[in-house]
Image: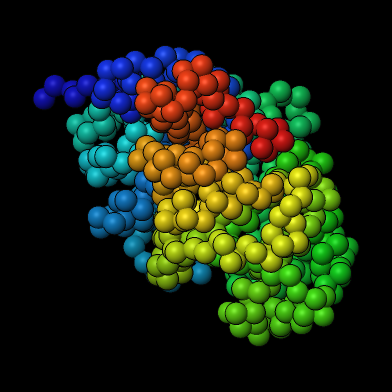
């Protein structure tokens, strides 16, 4: 059977209408080769510190990418058969598959499941542009793919730092807990390599009373900072301590993955009572929510002082599948979007800080119903607010189109922050940014052809959406 060609059509994602497609194509030529600013992501800083080769195709494309294995799991493929290890606390289960070629064959046998998804676009883009593969992934081509990718990964030009430079990454932000000593970031800095890898302050493990190991985390937080984290003042001082350290290691932002966007503005005595109950392990769900909400307001106060950009991305029901959480841990593809309120939830924070001009709070959502009803009007009024791009389940061509159509009419372009890839899958970064650049050029071309903006304005906006807005919003 002859191989099926893998073709990346040069006009993919552009409109069918010839006039609009032609303008989108011209706009795209002005932005396709711009450097990539990746201000919000989850790649591993150790990759760039060690600069050792990626192990193999399976370890690169399957094991770290929940977009991939959640789809296969939904069709009955066991996570153990994909090389996803069980936690140390999991009971007896299916044996872990360690034959990486066999795992790759399983992936190839199910590759058809990704038809029509952005994951398919990202993977095909990486296969073609990074590894020079010109046939589609099928069961028949699985071994050729595996051997080709593994052969490439053994070459110096496919090591993490070389790929960083090849991908034209100007800067990439990783995301670390306040408990992280940032040794890999320090090693990158001390190595003399010119690639810019910065951290972001993600305090969830020490601001969420429902986070696994919260009380133990606070004890470690105290030991790390020398502050009494059982006292409200000492607890806040510990955050200021670690934020200053993160900023010294290149951080320009904080990142908050709370279940909701609830914020609070409570008196100190009430805050101490909540902290006492959290440390005693007796906080109710409502009290845990109040604690998280108070900490968003406290983080905004600290950002006003230290200049770190604040990101809030609520609305994920995390670890929805209890068996997967028990056996495999967090971030294993079982996080599900939920309805999210912003107008009432953010009011305490906005009442305190909403009119500041030296504070930036970037809002994300997994609830697309709030684009035009809540998020765009909020960002279109409050100086501190900007809208993050379509995120996670919605960083697809269709999701990007919906966002632009619903948010632009009220928030405009300049209250948004361009694009970020939010990924652990390093090879997908150029593909994700390419999709975003194509979709923004499509949107701008449509506005220009319909005479809603001038062509000159479309050409001015295109590089801002692709590069300039993200760099400015994240103070990079």
Classify the position of the C terminus by image quarter.
top right
- Horizontally, is 203 left or right of 376 in the view? right
Residue at screen point 55% across, 43% down: 411
**Image quadrant where residue 272 sits:** bottom right
Whether residue 86 is visible: no
**Image quadrant where residue 48 sits:** top right
Q: As rendered, which of 13 and 382 lies closer to the eye?
A: 382
Whether residue 24 is visible: yes
**Image quadrant where residue 435 sits:** top left
- Where residue 119 appears, as percent x and y from the top left, is 36, 40
Residue at screen point 22% across, 21% down: 5
- Horizontally, is 194 left or right of 95 in the view? right
Q: As rendered, which of 290 and 2 lies closer to the eye?
A: 290
Q: As rendered, which of 442 and 90 lies closer to the eye?
A: 442
- Where residue 10 appears, as percent x and y from the top left, is 33, 18
Q: Height in image: 335 above or below 210?
A: above
- Where residue 390 appears, as percent x and y from the top left, is 47, 44
Q: Height in image: 292 above or below 377?
A: below
Residue at screen point 26% across, 22% down: 17
Q: As rendered, which of 457 and 8 lies closer to the eye?
A: 457
Q: Height in image: 414 above or below 438?
A: below
Classify the position of the N terminus by image quarter.
top left
- Where residue 174 appears, as percent x and y from the top left, is 63, 42
Residue at screen point 75% across, 74% down: 266
Q: How many numbered markers are drawn?
A: 0
Q: Height in image: 190 above or below 201?
A: above
């Amino acid at each position: 059977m002859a191989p099926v060609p893998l073709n990346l059509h040069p006009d993919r994602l552009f409109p069918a209408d010839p006039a609009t497609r032609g303008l989108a194509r011209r706009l795209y030529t002005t932005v396709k080769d711009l450097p990539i600013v990746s201000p919000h992501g989850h790649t591993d800083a150790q990759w760039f510190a060690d600069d050792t080769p990626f192990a193999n195709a399976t370890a690169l494309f399957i094991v770290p990418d929940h977009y991939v294995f959640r789809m296969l799991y939904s069709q009955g493929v066991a996570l153990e058969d994909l090389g996803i290890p069980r936690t140390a606390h999991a009971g007896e289960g299916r044996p872990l598959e360690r034959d990486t070629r066999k795992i790759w064959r399983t992936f190839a046998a199910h590759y058809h499941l990704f038809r029509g998804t952005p994951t398919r676009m990202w993977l095909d883009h990486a296969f073609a542009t990074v590894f020079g593969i010109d046939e589609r992934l099928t069961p028949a081509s699985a071994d050729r793919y595996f051997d080709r990718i593994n052969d490439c990964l053994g070459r110096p030009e496919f090591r993490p730092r070389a790929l960083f430079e090849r991908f034209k990454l100007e800067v990439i932000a990783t995301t670390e807990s306040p408990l992280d000593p940032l040794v890999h970031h320090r090693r990158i800095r001390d190595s003399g390599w010119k690639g810019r890898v910065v951290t972001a302050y993600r305090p969830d493990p020490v601001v969420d009373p429902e986070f696994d190991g919260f009380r133990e985390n606070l004890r470690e937080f105290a030991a790390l900072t020398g502050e009494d984290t059982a006292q409200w003042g000492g607890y806040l001082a510990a955050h200021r301590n670690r934020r200053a350290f993160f900023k010294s290691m290149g951080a320009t932002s904080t990142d908050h993955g709370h279940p909701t966007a609830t914020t609070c503005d409570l008196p100190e005595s009430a805050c101490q009572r909540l902290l006492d109950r959290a440390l005693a392990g007796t906080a109710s769900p409502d009290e845990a929510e109040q604690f998280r909400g108070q900490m968003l307001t406290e983080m905004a106060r600290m950002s006003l002082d230290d200049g770190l950009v604040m990101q809030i991305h609520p609305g994920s029901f995390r670890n929805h599948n209890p068996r997967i959480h028990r056996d495999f841990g967090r971030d294993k593809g079982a996080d599900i979007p939920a309805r999210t309120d912003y107008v009432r939830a953010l009011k305490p924070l906005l009442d305190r800080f909403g009119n500041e001009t030296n504070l930036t709070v970037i809002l994300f959502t997994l609830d697309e119903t709030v684009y035009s009803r809540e998020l765009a009007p909020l960002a279109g009024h409050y100086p501190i607010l900007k809208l993050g791009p379509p995120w996670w389940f919605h960083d697809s061509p269709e999701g990007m189109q919906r966002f632009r159509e619903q948010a632009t009419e009220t928030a405009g372009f300049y209250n948004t922050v361009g694009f970020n890839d939010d990924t652990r899958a390093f090879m997908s970064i150029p593909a994700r940014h390419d999709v975003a650049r194509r979709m923004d050029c499509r949107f701008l071309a449509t506005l220009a052809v319909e005479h809603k903006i001038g062509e000159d304005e479309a050409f001015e906006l295109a590089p801002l959406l692709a590069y300039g807005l993200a760099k400015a919003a994240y103070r990079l």
